[in-house]
Image: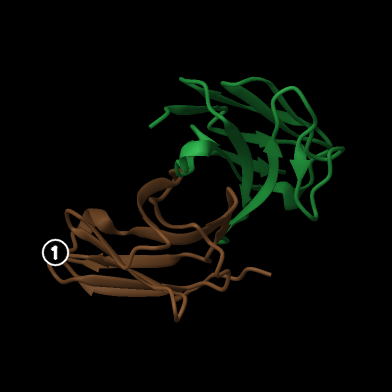
Amino acid sequence: GEDVEQSLFLSVREGDSSVINCTYTDSSSTYLYWYKQEPGAGLQLLTYIFSNMDMKQDQRLTVLLNKKDKHLSLRIADTQTGDSAIYFCAEDAGNMLTFGGGTRLMVKP
Amino acid sequence: SAVISQKPSRDICQRGTSLTIQCQVDSQVTMMFWYRQQPGQSLTLIATANQGSEATYESGFVIDKFPISRPNLTFSTLTVSNMSPEDSSIYLCSVISDRDSNQPQHFGDGTRLSIL
């Protein structure tokens, strides 16, 4: 079955870049997503990438997809304290999302 | 994207009771889903809410415990029945506006449920 894995924790200094990594197993995934969850809040869709793309950039966010290795990454440039949250990657195979365990990003001033 | 409202946003309930969570969308959507997020965990899909028919449940979830309604294209409810402390979780509604155009899933803010 599908299994999406992420590292549990990442700590960076304000102004640095953050890179959050994710591996997935379902090669039939159509889309791959990044969601952000702030304390006490629901999930906010940050960005997503179609499986036939290698890269997608949206302001401070860059998503890289290596389909051969089934590896997805989210880079946040100029990380701010407001970026502190849990980041979930998810793969979509036929509208059903399978989520990773989430990466807690801590941004130190 | 669609605006998704969940009610209640949080509740504290006694064991053995049931609670119905509502999910209202400001526009018609093709698909609606219910997820559970246990404390410190990721999200797990409970079921797909089907308009006008029974929900499609994932492995480990049954209709008697989590009855779901979807009377129209903008509204769904999830009931957590005969609650126990193990049901303490965040329950989230998500929607896909138009399945045929490969739209992403958007989530509501969730309902934080604590069972004493």
Query: B116 or B3: nearer the eye?
Result: B3
Considering depth in this image, is A59 or B61 the residue closer to the camera? A59
Which residue is situated farthest in the right direction here?
B64
**Chain A is shown in which shade?**
brown
The quadrant in which residue B38 appears is bottom right
**Residue that numbered label 1 is attached to:** A78
* Residue B52 placement (x, y as % from top left): 74, 22
For disc 1, the chain is A
Q: What is chain B's hue in the picture?
A: green
Residue A104, percent from left and from top: 40, 66
Q: Nearer the viewer, residue B110 or B51?
A: B51
- Residue at 52%, 37% in the rendered image: B100
Number of residue marks: 1
Q: Quadrant of residue B16?
A: top right
Mark 1 surroundings: few (<14), some (14-19) or many (≥20) residues within 10 A: some
User: In this rendering, would A18 be left or right of B13?
Assistant: left
Q: Residue at x 30, y 59 (%)?
A: A84
Q: Which residue is at a point 60% across and 21% down the rendered structure image?
A: B73
Residue at image position (26%, 57%) is A83
In the image, residue B12 above or below residue B38: above
Amino acid type, label 1: Asp
Q: Is residue B6 above or below residue A66?
A: above
Element at label 1 = loop
Left or right of A6 in this view: A74: left
